[in-house]
Image (spheres, rainbow, N blue to C red):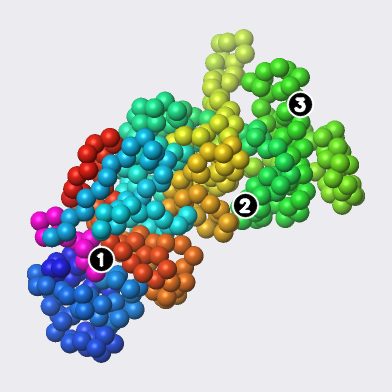
Amino acid sequence: MLNTPTFGEFVKAARGTRSQADLAGKADTFRQRFGQIESGQPHDLTETALAQLDAAFEWPTDFAQAALRATLNDHHDTHPTTYQPYDASDRGSCRLGYFADGSVLTSVNRIASTAPAAAFFPMIAAAGRTTLIDIHALDDDERLALGGLASQWNDITNASGRAVCTIAANPDSIGTGWTPIAIDPLPGITSLSQALTLTRRLRPIIEKHLPTDDMAIALSLLAAAIDLGDAQHKLGQSTHTNGIALIARPQGRSASWGRLLEVAGLPPHRYQRVDLTRVFRGLFDARDALIDVAYDPGAGTPISIAGQPEVVAAQDLNGALLLFDSHLTPELPVVVHAAVAAAGHLLPTVITGAADLFSDDFTGLVIDIHKIATALPTDRDWLRQWSAGELKYATITNYNSVTRRAVYTEGGRSHGIDLPDPYPVSASARTMPS
């Protein structure tokens, strides 16, 4: 492949304050080779030369080759990618993009990406599966672009989903098309094992302010879910009560709590009911942020509720595009993931800047957006683990917004990938757009 000015700039930035001679010695090559590459001169770089760059910088295998490819446009690339479009059988498959040979890129369940969140919008639109997007993973332009996606979401998903948000939707900052909602975590919880799994996955988030036994939380969660079911059964219509209202009431003795302990044979003195408003504090804070209060001094009731969000069960969010605030409600992706999975639906995609809040066994696809100015993080320990294949997640780096190409690295080996825009639907196979 031919060298490019962009690749030369990247190599120079990666070298930093180190001398060309020092790196040439590590790679068993000539200092002049580094000078030629950094100059951006369009001479051919062989696989051997690119492998020497990997050795010099201690990059993963084939990283230099993939990084160079990301800078090539179709005019200079003798092997442009061709790819198949989505069809009905592909929807929900979480297809991220394509490898350089045209095969589909399906990833491990967690990715750290230096590419912007907008690079994944075409994948979101094409897959049409439950997607949660953290407002803090977006810049201002991306927020408005996502607003356009929200306006079209029902059409994209064939009316099976909707665009909702748990933050105060300001059209000037995030666009129109969003329906503000509050999330109810209780419906769909039917077993202690299910409640315990949810509790353990919430532990990285709630342990800071709730150092309580996981079993006690899970028992309280299941008891509340049973109370909700009983209340809805008596009323005959589930719309007359909801879990988020039930657990916000003052705590009292629950018949379900006693029954659970008795049936399970658990000692009552060992477990106490947990205040679930503390477990789901973010969900309550998000709901409260969406409540609007009006004041009219001439009215008989001068202070009134001008608007409050619809309460939606987490299990009913299958196929939804959901915008949330990881600072306000970090537990939301875990709650939605558990509810969607328990209902037997496809696991959701989460785009966030706070993936460290998720437990290691969190499944689904999590794309952690790293807002950094360089193509690669500079932390030396991270770089060592990355090159040695010791990271528990894959990475997408060196994203080129012009070519929409990047480098995908997993297990210490790198691959050139394409993130097409747009993903065609129900069209014949064609060459990847530049």
In three-dimensional space, the C-alpha distance between marks 3 and 2, rounded to whole angstroms, equals 27 Å
Which kind of residue does numbered mark 2 sit on?
A: Arg
Answer with mark 1 or mark 2, whichever residue precedes in sequence.
Answer: 1
Q: Which residue is mark 3?
A: 230
Say what secondary structure mark 2 lies in. Answer: helix
Q: Which residue is mark 2?
A: 201
> What label does residue 67 carry, if any?
1
The magenta span reads 65-77
Viewer can see residue 415: yes
Residue at x 34% of width, y 78% of height: 58
Q: Whole-percent x and y of residue 69?
A: 21, 63
Say what secondary structure mark 3 lies in. Answer: helix
Does residue 116 appear left or right of residue 217 in this picture?
left
In three-dimensional space, the C-alpha distance between marks 1 and 2, rounded to whole angstroms, equals 36 Å
Neighbour tally class for label 1: few under 14, some 14-19, many 20 plus, Cα within 10 Å: many
In three-dimensional space, the C-alpha distance between marks 1 and 3, rounded to whole angstroms, equals 59 Å
